């Protein structure tokens, strides 16, 4: 069983959106997935209530019960746990980092998210856990100066997962309906992004199989450079691009769906 945690001290970066959609993509690729929602707001518990099937169960678990919950999930044959952390440095996000095989730090291509990523990375490094960044809500025209600055800043701090995730209505619509983007429009661009993202994460999990990953020479050099050079310098202030895609008002569907772990994945599909 592997555990990935979406963490960043910045709310709105896309933790819950990406956690739910990658969980569904992994499920469709044959994993037995369980989501642990550690955010007191319980966005993904609400998402699972809107979901009609219980194939990707979600449970809110407080930090004190996390280790026990993970042991129980492993016993049940779950192969992938996706932890969604709150958007603040708290006991909950600390606990999420501690149990993760890989911490994924999503950031939008704006300087506030990049600053927050730097703080989150420091906290993860303190705990000697593996991490990778993810650039989310990129404007559709990817050759954008703001995106390029984001890519450079994150690459300088550590691994940046591929692909860059674009701002797409599918992510918002899928979340509203309790779906992953690969269920909403299986042939859509967002679905393709999530399949690719799951492949990247899987590769990264294999690479960092040892609990404490020794960085490669190149990574160590890049990290040392990033430590010496604050993100403010990597992502200078001359940002003139318009802000990200408009934020949706999250509509929480009332439909109740039992959130129980399911036996075997029905759909087997290569990522
Ligand atoms: N790739 C994306 N494209 C469009 N909207 C997105 C995308 N990622 C996140 N959002 C939207 O941004 C908002 C914040 O995302 P959310 O997942 O709640 O962030 P967090 O969990 O980090 O606070 C939500 O309204 C969500 O629908
Ligand atoms: Mg959230």
Image (cartoon, rainbow, N blue to C red):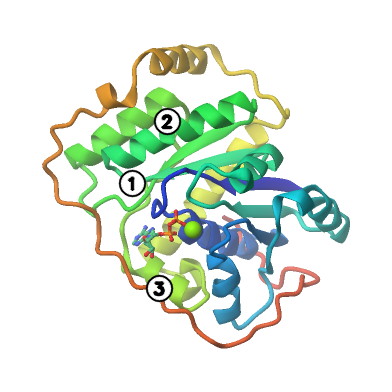
Left or right of 245? Residue 88 is right
Q: Is 242 drawn above or below residue 220 in the view shown?
A: below
Horizontal relation, residue 6 to residue 12: left or right: right
How crowded pointer 1 is (Cα within 10 Å; few <14, some 14-19, many 20+) is rated as: many
Question: In this view of the protein, can residue 222 be seen by the observer?
Answer: yes
Q: Nearer the viewer, mark 1 or mark 2?
A: 2
Label 3 environment density (alpha carbons within 10 Å; few <14, some 14–19, many ≥20): few
Q: Could you say where residue 130 lies in the image, as x and y percent from the top left?
A: 61, 31
Kind of element beneath mark 2: helix
Q: Is mark 1 within 8 Å of ligand 1?
A: no
Q: Which residue is mark 3?
A: 250
Q: Residue at x 46, y 67 (%)?
A: 181
* Nearer to the camera, 15 or 32: 15
Q: On the image, numbered disc 2 is attached to which residue?
A: 118
Left or right of 197? Residue 143 is left
- Residue where numbered disc 1 is placed: 108
Residue appearing at x 86%, y 61% in the figure: 76
From mark 2 to mark 3, how far is it between C-alphas? 28 Å
Please tell me in which quarter of the rendered image ligand 1 is found: bottom left
Does 247 appear above or below 1?
Answer: below
Quadrant of the rendered image containing residue 215: top right
The yes-or-no answer for disc 3 within 8 Å of ligand 1 is: yes
Sequence-earlier tag: 2 or 3 = 2
- Asked if the residues shown at circle 1 and circle 2 are in contact, with their CB atoms under 8 angstroms apart, the answer is no
**Residue 63 at x, y = what percent?**
71, 50
User: For the residues marked 3 and 1, what is the alpha-carbon distance in whole angstroms?
Assistant: 19 Å
Q: Secondary structure at mark 1?
A: loop
User: Tag 1 or tag 3, which sits nearer the N-term?
Assistant: 1
């Amino acid at each position: 069983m592997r555990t990935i945690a979406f963490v960043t001290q910045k709310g709105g970066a896309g933790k819950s959106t990406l956690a739910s959609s990658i969980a569904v993509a992994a499920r469709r690729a044959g994993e037995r997935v369980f989501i642990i929602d550690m955010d007191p707001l319980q966005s993904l518990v609400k998402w699972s209530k809107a979901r009609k099937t219980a194939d990707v169960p979600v449970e809110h678990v407080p930090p004190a019960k996390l280790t026990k919950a993970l042991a129980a999930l492993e016993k049940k044959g779950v192969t992938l746990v996706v932890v969604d952390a709150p958007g603040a440095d708290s006991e909950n996000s600390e606990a999420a980092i501690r149990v993760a095989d890989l911490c994924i730090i999503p950031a939008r291509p704006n300087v506030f998210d990049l600053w927050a990523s730097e703080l989150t990375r420091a906290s993860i490094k303190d705990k000697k856990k593996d991490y990778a960044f993810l650039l989310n809500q990129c404007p559709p025209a990817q050759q954008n100066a703001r995106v390029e600055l984001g890519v450079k800043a994150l690459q300088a701090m550590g691994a940046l997962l591929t692909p860059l995730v674009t701002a797409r209505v599918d992510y918002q619509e899928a979340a509203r309906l309790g779906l992953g983007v690969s269920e909403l429009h299986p042939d859509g661009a967002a679905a393709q992004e999530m399949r690719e993202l799951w492949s990247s994460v899987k590769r990264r999990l294999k690479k960092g199989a040892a609990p404490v990953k020794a960085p490669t020479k190149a990574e160590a050099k890049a990290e040392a450079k990033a430590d010496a050079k604050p993100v403010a310098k990597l992502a200078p202030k001359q940002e003139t691009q318009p802000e990200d895609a408009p934020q949706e008002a999250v509509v929480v569907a009332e439909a109740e769906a039992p959130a129980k772990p399911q036996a075997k994945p029905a759909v087997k599909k290569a990522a």
